[in-house]
Image: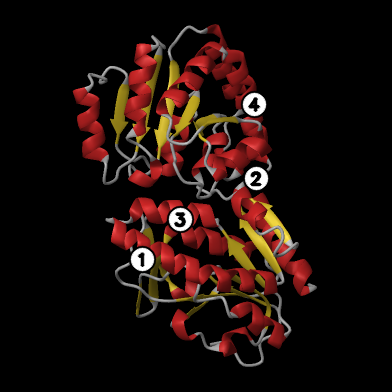
Amino acid sequence: MPVAGASRGCLAVVLHCPIVAVRGDSVELSAKFLEEIERYAKFWPGTVRLIAFEDPNWATSFGTTIRKIESLPFELVVQSHDDLDERVFHDAAAVLCGIGHRYDHLAEMGRGLGVPVVYVAEWSRRTQNVITAIDSPNAFVKARRLFWLWRQRRRIRKSIAAATALQCNGTPTFDEYAQLNPQRLLYFDSRITDDLLINREELDGRTARLVEGAHPIQLVFTGRLTPTKGVLDLVAVAIELRNREVDFKLSIVGDGDLVDELRARIVRHQLGSLMTVLAPKQFRSELIPFVQQMDLFVCPHPQGDPSCTYLETLACGVPIVGYANEALEGVARHSHAAWHVPLGKPSALAAEIARLAIARAEVSAASIAALQFATEHTFDKTYGRRVDQLRQLAGI
């Protein structure tokens, strides 16, 4: 609970990510989420209070970390999201919260308290529907889940309209909610710090070798090997590229439910000399240096969630070619470092890669644009802009 007599300078953060467990004087939580809250604390001039709930069954592909509660650079309040105690907001200068049925009353609550409430919007209606359809085990479950989303959407839109402002991760929600709330900030999420950006001299050397055409074009995919990432389409893309006699190598880095099926298809279609499936790599010390050696990222995502993968790839000076999901369309429009083809068309994706394998100067120019865009959207710059908006709304 808030400290008695605390000044009205607190930023209250209520987001979806749960606490895995509180054990005495320590807490276990998502390492990636911790980095995010630490950035709010870095840029906010007062106290940051995280209101979270505990879920021992929660799991994350990004790993968890255990910290002493007293060492956290923010105040931690663990309670039920289904029964939020309004007192945690009484000394708040601003409230930042996720979008969902648990939080759709917070905008009106903020009005009553005279506190600006800013929602974080990540999944558009279209993306929610696509992900729900892909993740549903059968038609009955899919229909039930889609109906639930449809019922919630009216309440969510009402809360968005009532909010002081929105922070939109990617263009899909930024565009979708334009008529509901004009106070929108567009950002592109990632965990890229300045030290992880590819060195311009290294990039120039790589693109020079690419343009010379002395080696196969190096293709890469990184991420979870699941249906929502469309990874099995990579096999169809590789078959088409082989049929077109494109000189290429495709490296796939990740793990997931489809890893065994992916490996089996590679063997079945005799693609072992062209495709390699590699185990997940440590992000900073292994994955980023590996991707920095690549020429093109192949992105068969059928859905448009605002994945950090986009900005993390561009930070390596690697442009993206993929399906025209909502998120990639927006990244392409703003960065000039991506190309897209119709959804679910691996033959079209292969045709575009084949074209780019010849138009290597175009890939080189997009590689430079990728680095320039990522440089303006690093972790600190992004969260600095987000906190600046909150400070302006709070008048501090």
Tell me the residue at 32%/18% (across/down): 274
Q: Amino acid at mark 2?
A: His
Between circles 1 and 2, the one closer to the viewer is 1
What separation in Å lies between label 1 and label 4 (alpha carbons)? 46 Å
Quarter-wise, where is residue 219 in the image?
top left
In terms of secondary structure, where does tag 1 sit? helix
Residue that carries the numbered disc 2 in the rendered image: 377
* Crowding at mark 1 (Cα within 10 Å: few <14, some 14-19, many 20+): few
Between circles 3 and 2, the one closer to the viewer is 3
What separation in Å lies between label 1 and label 3 (alpha carbons)? 12 Å
Quarter-wise, where is residue 132 in the image?
bottom left
Earlier sequence position, callout 4 versus callout 3: 3
Does 158 sit above or below residue 177?
below
Tell me the residue at 61%/55% (across/down): 173
Earlier sequence position, callout 1 versus callout 3: 3
Q: Amino acid at mark 1?
A: Arg
Tell me the residue at 64%/84% (across/down): 109
